[in-house]
Image (cartoon, rainbow, N blue to C red):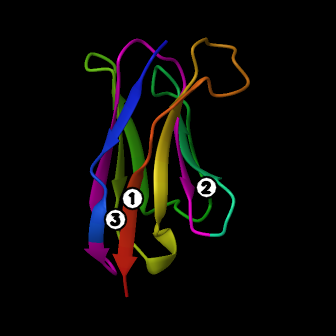
Amino acid sequence: QVQLVESGGGLVQFGGSLRLSCAASGRTYTMGWFRQAPGKEREFVAAISWSSLNIYYADSVKGRFTISRDNAKNTMYLQMNRLKPEDTAVYYCAAKNSRGADAYDYWGQGTQVTVSS
């Protein structure tokens, strides 16, 4: 069982930046970031394959957020720039435990990101 721990959330002003980290206790394959705003369903933000060759973004964050990972440290990152109030949410990291997995097997506890206008 792999444990995921997010960090880096906080309060930031409109247009500011934050960098989220997700530390895994073991090896993982594809990893991703999701977020859930109050009263809304959880939504996909970004995903990255183990090799970092395949990267995907939600349209709402494309051009502002950058996902990356350091496999030597079992850590994934999300650099968030030009933040908007609508980015306010609890951000969760997730990971798959095999190359061909359809669903994410592991989830973190979440970190709060609040963007003030």
Say which of 3 and 85 sits in front: 3
* Residue 22 percent location from the top left of the image: 36, 35
For numbered disc 2, what is the local secondary structure?
Answer: loop
Q: To which quarter of the image does residue 56 belong?
A: top right
Q: Looking at the image, do the residues carrying marks 1 and 3 touch, with CB atoms under 8 Å apart?
A: no
Give the foreground label among 1 and 2.
1
- Horizontally, is 30 left or right of 24 in the view? right
For numbered disc 1, what is the local secondary structure?
Answer: strand
Residue segment shown in magenta: 12-38
Cα separation between marks 1 and 3: 16 Å
Three-letter residue code for mark 3: Asn
Three-letter residue code for mark 2: Ala
Three-letter residue code for mark 1: Gln
**Residue at left offset 64%, top offset 54%:** 43
Say which of 7 and 19 sits in front: 7
Question: Magenta includes 50?
Answer: no
Cα separation between marks 3 and 2: 15 Å
* Residue 77 percent location from the top left of the image: 34, 40
Q: Which residue is mark 2?
A: 58
**Residue at left offset 58%, top offset 21%:** 96
Question: Magenta includes 16?
Answer: yes
Cα separation between marks 1 and 2: 19 Å
Q: Which residue is mark 3?
A: 81
**Residue at left offset 53%, top offset 59%:** 62
* Residue 63 percent location from the top left of the image: 47, 61
* Residue 112 image label: 1
